[in-house]
Image (tube, grey):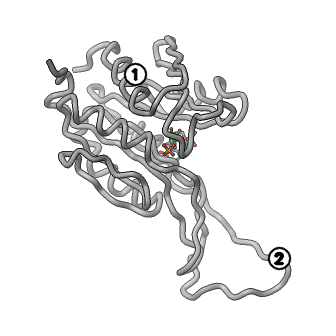
Amino acid sequence: QSDKAFSGKKILITSGPTQEAIDPVRFISNHSSGKMGAAIAEAFASQGAEVHLVLGKGAKKPKDSSIHIHPVVSAQEMYDQAVQIHPSADIAVFAAAVADYAPKHIADEKIKKGGDSMSIELIKNVDIALALGKKKAPHQTHIGFALETENEEFHAKEKLSKKNFDLIVLNSMRDAGAGFQTDTNKVRIFSEDGTEVNSDLLPKEKIAQLILEKLKQLPVKI
Ligand code: PMT
């Protein structure tokens, strides 16, 4: 017997890395593989939801062909897609690793090798979760992620309130097998109402199910 608890719900998920161009051949990015986002997308789809996945370049695509994929490259493009889907979404999950800064100028031609050092001026990117958190309607639920290297709980809880999340999923770079690239993850899920769920090291598919289970325990929004 299948559980279609999210039937009739529209889900927005950001996943994967963003790439911020420096010149036509180089970019700034990070190690996100999109595995965590793909697992969450599959979990929602298998429970009957209409899933829209805003996906960074090179990130893992889910197998379920019912999932709508919106490919993007930069943080600005990810925001532009997400902001269009967001008003009609019931739940938004911010699993992407978004570059916080991007080169101020993108060189038209390949930058040539010159002196012994060079610098690139960076400017702040849009914070997608923060911006959409400000637009969050009473019936909408937002789930964020925090990838931390130190003082994990403090930083995660700070992001939970600052970005207006209902839940935040903390993964730490200090846990072997957790975070970027791996098929597994180990998380702590903090809720806006003060509750906490801790997981063992589990396949990302199981972590996705755990997040959905926690979500189902939240007070129903109308
Ligand atoms: O893709 P994988 O290889 O499977 O790895 C999964 C993951 C480690 C990328 C994922 O589990 C994860 O933790 N994603 C968030 C990583 C991150 O950038 O965290 P952060 O603490 O910098 O950001 C906090 C939250 O704000 C996140 O929900 C992030 O998506 C969002 N954010 C951040 C910056 C920005 N400009 N826009 C955002 O929306």
52 relative position to 124: left or right: left
| Pointer 2 residue | 117
List x then y, in percent, for residue 38: 36, 43
| SS at badge 1 | helix
Q: Is residue 123 above or below residue 177?
A: below
Residue 21's quadrant in the figure?
bottom right
Residue 40's quadrant in the figure?
top left
47 relative position to 134: left or right: left
List x then y, in percent, for residue 157: 58, 24
Residue 72's quadrant in the figure?
bottom left
Q: Amino acid at mark 2?
A: Ser
Mark 2 Cβ and ligand 1 under 8 Å apart = no
Residue at the location (56% across, 32% down)? Answer: 159
21 relative position to 12: left or right: right
List x then y, in percent, for residue 74: 46, 62
Q: Amino acid at mark 1?
A: Leu
Residue at the location (40% across, 42% down)? Answer: 37
Q: Residues within 10 Å of mark 2 (few under 14, many from 20)?
A: few
| Pointer 1 residue | 210
Residue in front for this viewpoint, 100 or 5: 5
Residue at the location (60% across, 86% down)? Answer: 110
List x then y, in percent, for residue 124: 59, 57
Q: Residues within 10 Å of mark 1 (few under 14, many from 20)?
A: some
| SS at badge 2 | loop
